Structure formats: C-alpha cells, structure tokens
Image (cartoon, rainbow, N blue to C red):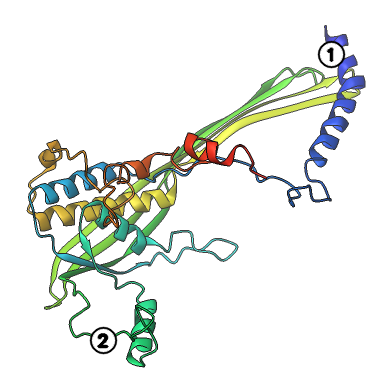
Amino acid sequence: MTSKLALFARTRLPAMLVAGSLAIASCAAPTAGRNGLYAQPAGGAPVTTNPTPYSAALTCLGRYARSSNFNAPRIAVGRIVDYTGKRELEGGAKITQGASLMAISAFAKAGARLVERYDTSVSELELKYANNKLISDNGAEYRKIKAGSVAGSDFYLVGGITELNFNIASSGVDAYGGDVDVTDPKGLFKASTYVMNIGLDLRLVDTKSLEVVDVISYQKQIIGYEISAGIFAFFNQQNIIDINAGSKSLEPMQLAVRSAIERAVLEISANLYGVSGPSVCSYYDPLSTNGGTGNFINAHNNLEANNGYTRQDPNRWHRDRDPYVRSFLRGRYD
C-alpha cells in the first residue's frame, strides 16, 4: 500500500498540481467577454438585515409606543466618536467610525421621532440657495423660507467608544507527535481561544437646558478561536506530503459595537417611554411599519405590501430569488 501511494505521489501528483494551477490561472482571462467583463465577481448572497440580540426588543418597543398613542420626544444623534485611539498597521482605525449611524438606526427601530443633526450639509446648502431665490418647487415660483419650518429636538445623544482591550484572557494547546523514524508520518494539532472587549459611554442631553438626563456605560466581550491540524510524511526518501487544515473565527468586532449601542438605546428609549420592562413585547401589530431595518413613513397607501417586514425578506427584489423579477428579466443577466 505504501509503495502504491509513493508511486502516485511521484508520477501523477505533480501532473495534477500543474493541471490545477493552469485551471485556476484560466479563470481570469486577459480578454473581456461579450458582456464586457474579464470575470464575474465571486459570491451572490442576498442582502439581509443586520440584527443584534437587542433588535427585536427595540422593534417591540416601537410597537408599544404606537399602540399606546405615545407622543415620543424628538431625538437627535450627535457625534459618537472612537476614543480608543487603536489603529491598524495599514493606518485605518480598528473600531468603526460609524457609531452615530448605528445609534440612528437603533432609535428608528424603537419608533423614535428622529430629526437630522449629524449631517445637515445638504439642508444648509438648500437654505442658502432658497435665501438667494435660486430654488423652486414647482418650476414657476421660488421657494420661500418660512419661520419655524424646521422641527426642533427635545433630546440629543452623544458619547463615544471608550474601550478596546485585547486578549483579556486566552488559552490553548499545541501538540506534535510521531515516530522517531524520519520516514514515518508526523502529526500536529493546535487549538486556542482568546477574549477581548469593547466599551462605550453615552449620554442623553436635554436640548433646551443642556441638562444630562441619562447616562449609559456598557461593555461587550468578544471571543475568537483557532483550530488547526496537519500531517507530514516522507515517501521512499524522494517525495514528501505536507497537509494542514483548520479554521479560525473571531466574533465580529463592529457587530459588538452595534450590540452595545442598541442595548444602550433600548434602555434610554424605555426610560423615555415609561416602560417598566420587556412585558410590553407581548403586543403584536401585523401592519407595523417598524421592522428589523429601522422605521419609515409611508409615501403611498401600500402598507400591507411594503412595510418593515417585507424589507427583511432576503429574497425580495433579488434577481435569482424573486420570481417576479426573474420572470421579467427572463434570465438575461449579461
């Protein structure tokens, strides 16, 4: 058996490796095809929602506010900055710089009435144009500036990501074994786990009085693991075989930031709504516009066919998964 394996490794294995290399190289052709592309991009997974373990609670909190006809206060989200100062070797930040956007999405899931304060550049430019009578809404008359047309906020959220701690704890095993004879196979096994965390501090401020009315500080631990195994052996003193396999996974760091922000926004919103606890989640509104993606105001009377729940469907509008789109395209994707 050993001699047959050695013969295979000496004669056919090199040819198979060469053939495989040529096949891989041919995947990227130097000439564009009829569709104008050198190669099709890899992948094709549909777009899905990006929930955390607290997204469902935010959604049910929004349902509770609407079912109770609660007049939710207007919320603005300011700068939630990365204060960790941790950078990648290439120069980029290790922690997301979009924490403010995550907080806006979280408040939308909770049914809050949001007013824009994070990026008002377009509104300010249009106000400038309107002040110079350069903008019209119906093509005939310039837009008039009306006093009090911009809604004010009752509270605003600010804060920052204040912690990023690597390797809080780690453990592992590294083993290597085999016969003392150099021609006999040798094996190795390696496994390790490690834990890190992120932390944030947020505060809710009364816009009129600038009084800090709520402060939240949370941390979220993140776990990672790595497992690998391999074998190394000689055949007839002429050929060798070296095979290694394994897997490595790290809980998404930026998703941990989103989870901590959603938990903070959940507690802040529950306080604003006067909610005592998760018992409010027993209410269910089948026509709620608040899904796992956020909240929106209906532009047309099509709530039953186009609401927050349909937005969560990964097959909707996908050319390979939605039968309506597929029948329209008739398979002509190029």
Residue 96 appears in view: yes
Disc 2 versus disc 1: distance between alpha carbons?
85 Å
Image coordinates of residue 192 in percent, x first then y, are 51, 35
- Quadrant containing the C terminus in the rendered view: top right
Q: Nearer the viewer, residue 276 or 153?
A: 153
Residue 215, image quadrant: bottom left
Placement of 191 over or under 221, stated as above or below: above
Classify mark 1: residues with Cα within 10 Å, few (<14), some (14-19) or many (20+): few
Relative image position of residue 36 (x, y in whole percent):
74, 52
Q: Residue furthest front?
A: 140
- Tell which circle, 2 or 1, labels the residue nearer the N-terminal end: 1
Count the marks: how many?
2
Question: In this picture, is 250 found above or below 271?
Answer: above
In the image, what residue occupies the spot 22% across and 45% down?
288
**From this viewpoint, which residue is outermost toward the bottom?**
132
Name which residue type carries label 1: Leu
Residue that numbered label 1 is attached to: 5
Q: Position of residue 244 (x, y in %)?
A: 68, 29
Camera-side residue of 204 and 236? 204
